[in-house]
Amino acid sequence: QKEVEQDPGPLSVPEGAIVSLNCTYSNSAFQYFMWYRQYSRKGPELLMYTYSSGNKEDGRFTAQVDKSSKYISLFIRDSQPSDSATYLCAMGVSASGSARQLTFGSGTQLTVLP
Amino acid sequence: DSGVTQTPKHLITATGQRVTLRCSPRSGDLSVYWYQQSLDQGLQFLIQYYNGEERAKGNILERFSAQQFPDLHSELNLSSLELGDSALYFCASSGLQGGNTIYFGEGSWLTVV
């Protein structure tokens, strides 16, 4: 079993829809959680970062973390065609010193249709 | 633009050869990470350096090695290349001021033929 499982998609929605992207994890040591957006053959771009259970909002994006259920979500409101990309969840253990490697989900490919 | 610079962007080489990928971290970042992304494996952590010292090791093959230099740039050396090494190789960096935030470069696309 992978440490991080992510709905593989692909996911196709009409413009303006609310998108829900999800990941589950098995490692209780994960303390901080990120969502990255990756356009085709480009570097992952950090969207959201949180380390506590609950919701964090940034514009049209809301990250939700439920540590008790080991479940994280990213919601995109009023989705736009420019949101079409692969979304990767990532998690890390807040190790002492400077070790901060991330474990990634496999990514969900999202297409927003105009 | 994340501020992380990688060269070359694209590279085609033959099996058995050796290549070097270069990374300049964001200004002030002391940590450099290398990740490999292939179609079937997703984004896999290879290795992390912090201020010139190896700090964490992931799924890095023995044929691969990396180092971080005094000016903080890093190189990933891939030797005895095989067809299966074809992938996107990403460098990322983070700094203490940035907390746990890790920023990625645009990647080096390696094709082994």
Image (cartoon, rainbow, N blue to C red):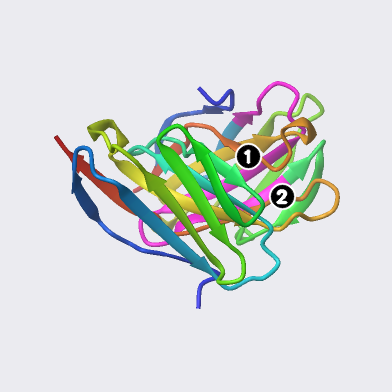
CB contact under 8 Å: marks 1 and 2: yes
What amino acid is at disc 2?
Answer: Arg
- Kindly report the secondary structure that dominates the magenta region of the rendered protein: strand
Q: Residues within 10 Å of mark 2 (few under 14, many from 20)?
A: many
Write down the region rendered in magenta.
B23-48
Q: Is residue B14 visible?
A: no
- Chain letter of the residue carrying label 2: A
Give the SS element for disc 1: loop
What amino acid is at disc 1?
Answer: Ile
Query: Residue under circle 2?
Result: A100
Query: Residue under circle 1?
Result: B102
Residue A108 image position (x, y, % from top left): 35, 54
Q: Quadrant of residue B34?
A: top right
Q: Residues within 10 Å of mark 1 (few under 14, many from 20)?
A: many
Q: Is residue A109 visible?
A: yes
Residue B62 image position (x, y, % from top left): 64, 60
Residue A3 image position (x, y, % from top left): 55, 70
Give whichever of B91, A96 is nearer the camera: A96
Name which residue lies at 61% across and 58% down: B60
Name which residue lies at 82% across and 28% down: B70
Task: Reply yes or no: does residue B42 show up in magenta.
Answer: yes
Distance from label 1 to label 2 (Cα)? 8 Å
Name which residue lies at 62% across and 57% down: A53
Classify A43 as above or below A111: above
Classify B99 as above or below B78: above
